[in-house]
Image (tube, grey):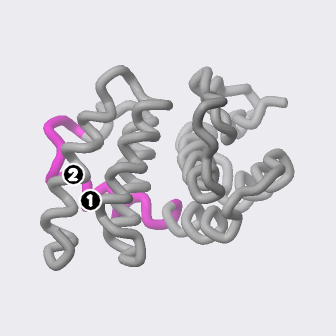
Amino acid sequence: MKLVSDSSGVPINLPPNAIAESESPKKKLSERQKARRMVLQALYQWQLANASASDIQAEFRAYYLGKIDWKYFNEVFPAIVPRAAQLDEAIIPYLDRDIQALDPIELSLLRFGMYELLHRIDIPFKVVINESVELARIFGATDSHKYINGILDKAARQIRTLEV
């Protein structure tokens, strides 16, 4: 079953390792980590397929089984989508290139990380950065984890001044 298709029904290929479960038998993912992967995948799908957030949410709910932090997924993913333009504006000052030049995975990760830095103060900034970097290592291009780390670290220093 292909999860991603554009508005005309044409399939869009996800990165080869774009799954919610762990690829490595050595490391067991927590329910929150699985939910984070799903948020990234849902943002990627939303960005490329132009489907509604509620449709993507329902599709993920039907497709993914097992122990997943659904509360987190259902709070975070639908909160990011309507704020995409606002999050992009918050990201732009930290970029060294035009936002349109970003890889779709990098852009999704930066929106996700920026959302957590700005709106989820219950999550320590180091966790936001570390989880984003880990997702970039798994799903992103070769050195995208370094880029994500640099952008979110700069943003955290200005956004979470009391915590840093």
For the N terminus, give its image quadrant: top right
Residue at 59%, 58% (x, y): give it: 32
Residue 46 visible to the viewer: no
Residue denoted by label 1: 89
For disc 2, the neighbor class at 10 Å (few under 14, some 14 to 19, many from 20) is few
x, y percentage for residue 3?
75, 36
Q: Are marks 2 and 1 in contact (CB under 8 Å)?
A: yes
Residue at 41%, 31% (x, y): give it: 137
For the C terminus, give its image quadrant: bottom left
x, y percentage for residue 133?
36, 42
Q: Amino acid at mark 2?
A: Ile
x, y percentage for residue 12?
66, 27
Residue at 32%, 34% (x, y): give it: 145
Give the side of residue 54 with respect to residue 131, left or right. Answer: right
Residue 138 visible to the viewer: yes
Q: Which residues are magenta?
A: 81-98
How many marks the image carries: the answer is 2
Residue denoted by label 2: 92
